[in-house]
Image (tube, rainbow, N blue to C red):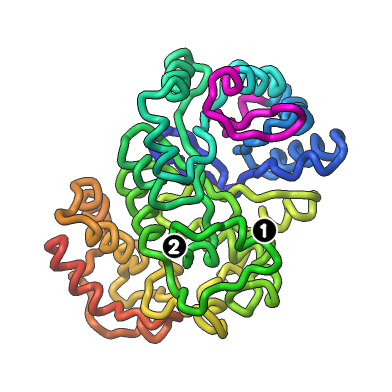
Amino acid sequence: MKKRLLGKTGLWVSEVGFGGEWLERHSQEESINLIRYAGERGINIIDCWMPDPKSRDIIGRAISGSRENWYVQGHLGSTWQNGQYVRSREIKYVKPAFEDLLMRLQTDYIDLGMIHYVDTEEDWEGLQDSEFMRYVKELKDKGAIRHIGMSSHNPKVAKLAVQSGLIEMLLFSINPAFDMLPAEEDLDALLSEGYTYDQAFSGIDTDRAQLYRLCEEKNVGITVMKGFAGCRLFDEKRSPFGVPLSPVQCIHYALTRPGVSSILCGYDTKEQVDQAVHYEDASEAEKDYASVLANAPYHSYRGECTYCGHCKPCAAQLDIAMINKYYDLAAMQPETPATIRSHYMLLEHKASECIGCRACESRCPFGVSIAERMKKTAEVFGC
C-alpha cells in the first residue's frame, strides 16, 4: 500500500483508507475482523464520526494491541443523545462525547481531531472565539488530539477554514458527480433515488476546483469521504453521466485531485476491501476514469484538465499533468505563491521545453489545448 503525506500533519497515510460508517450494520465480531483485515492489507487510517457506542467499541477492539499502526480521525461535535446522533456545539454534550470516544477506542489520544460537519458560513463564523473552539484548542495543547482537522461538504465554507490557518487537514466529499455541483446544492438529495441532475452542470464547479488548489498551496491535506457517491456511480441508471464507473476509477479520480492524500471507503465485506486495495496494482486501463467521462452521454468535462495523465508520454519528457496543476494553482492568485513557484522549479523539465508537437493533445480525452497551456505556464513562471 502506497502512503502519502497528509499535508502539514507529517503523517504518512495509506492512499486507501477506512470509512467506518457501515460498521454498526454487522455483528461486532464481523466488523472487528473487517478492520483487522484492512490493516493487514496496508490500510492505516480510519474515520470515526459515528457517536453510537457499538461502532466506537468495534473500532476500539479492532485496533487494540496495534494502536500505533493506525491514524484515527475522531470527530468533535458528533454526539449521542437519547439513543440517536445529534450534531452539537454545546460543551455539555461535546466534551462527554469526546471522552467517550477515547474510552471506547481504548486510547488517550486521537491523531486527527475533526471539527465535525461544518457546512454553512454561519456555523463557521459561530465557531470562532466560541467555547467549542477553545475546547478543541485545549485538547490540542494537552495532546489529546495531535492535529486539528475539519469535515465539510461545502467548498465555500471549507475554503474559509483552509484560509484561516486553523486546520491542518480536511475531510471533504469528492467524486466526479459531486464535483459538478455548486456549493449550495444539497448532497444528501443527490444520494436519494429521485434526484435528477441539472443538464446545465458540466465540468468541475469553480469553488471546488479552487478549494483543491488552495489546499495544495496551503499544504492542508485532504482525506476523501463519499468517493463513490453512495455507490450511485457504479450504476449507469443512477449515474448522472449515464455510464458506470468502477471503484478503482472513483479512487483514482479522488487521488488525482490536488491536495488529496487518502480516500476513505466504506466496506461491508473483505471482498470490498480487496476491490479497493486492488487500486495499488491496477493497470492504467483499469484506473482510466477520463475516457469514461469524456465519452459519457451526459455532463461533459470538455476543455478541462483533470490531471488524468492520458497526455503521457511527452516527447520532451514533460510531466504535463503536474505542470498543468501548478499552472492552475498559480493562475488562481494575483501573484504566484512562492511555494508553488518553488515546487514548479523542482520539476526536471519545464513548460518552456515544450516543442509544440501537440501529440499529447491527440491523447487528451477532454480536448485540452495543452501546447497553449505550456506557453502560458512558461510566461507565468518565466521558464
Relative depth, front residue between 19 and 128 = 128
Residue at numbered disc 2: 182
Segment tinted magenta in the rendering:
67-95
Report the residue at 61% width, 22% height from top.
93
Would residue 82 be counted in the magenta stretch? yes
Relative depth, front residue between 10 and 267 = 267
Query: Residue 48: in sight, yes or no?
Result: no
Give the x, y percent position of residue 62: 75, 30
Q: Which mark is residue 230?
A: 1
Q: What residue type is labelled 1?
A: Gly
Give the x, y percent position of residue 16: 60, 49
**Does 193 appear above or below 337?**
below
Q: Residue furthest top?
A: 142
| Spatial CA span between label 1 and label 2 | 19 Å
Of labels 1 and 2, the one closer to you? 2
Disc 1 is placed on an element classified as loop
Drawn side of residue 86 relative to residue 322, left or right: right
**Does 142 appear above or below 377?**
above
Q: How crowded is mark 1: few (under 14 residues within 10 Å), some or many (20 or more)?
A: few
User: For residue 237, what is the image quadrant?
Assistant: bottom right
**Does 356 appear above or below 345?**
below
